[in-house]
Amino acid sequence: MTAFRYNLPLNKGESLKRSHVTRHAVAPDDAISNRIVVLEDVLDLTLREPVQAGDIILESHFMATPISDYQAAEEPKT
């Protein structure tokens, strides 16, 4: 089974680029249900939280994904 991982730490608000990602084999029992399986689905999307090098790329890391069609609530303007 394959998982995409960040190859460097990224901050909230950064857009994911192909150069930020590496692909690794993971054991089937390490499978995470909301991991990204098609990298193109999340390229250029904005991170909603900081991530560390080696973290598996998850759908929940992004403001919105084509997979879930999740839209994060906008922060109130002050």
Image (cartoon, rainbow, N blue to C red):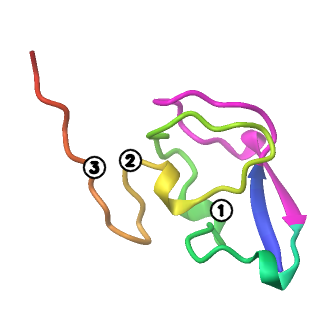
Is the residue under label 2 in contact with that under label 1 (CB below 8 Å)? no
Point out the image quarter for the C terminus. Answer: top left
Residue that mark 2 sits on: 63
Instruction: Report the residue at 54% width, 63% height from top.
Output: 41
Name the secondary structure under disc 1.
helix
Estimate the spatial distance between the alpha carbons at disc 2 and disc 3, rounded to whole Å.
6 Å
Q: Mark 1 = which residue?
A: 39
Q: Return the residue at label 3.
A: 72
In the rendered structure, the answer to whether residue 45 lies left or right of residue 75 reads: right
Q: Which residues are magenta?
A: 6-24
The residue type indicated by label 2 comes to Met
How many marks can you see? 3
Q: Specify which label sits upstream in the sequence, 2 or 3.
A: 2
Residue 20 lies, in percent from the top left, at: 74, 40
Q: Secondary structure at mark 2?
A: loop
Residue drawn at (65%, 62%) of the image: 39
State whether residue 75 is above or below residue 38: above
Question: Circles 2 and 3: CB distance less than 8 Å?
Answer: yes
Say which element carries label 3.
loop
In percent of width and height, residue 51 lies at 63, 38
Relative vertical location of residue 26 with respect to residue 50 in this rendering, above or below: below
Mark 1 or mark 2: name the one nearer the start of the chain.
Answer: 1
Is residue 12 found inside the magenta-colored segment of the image? yes
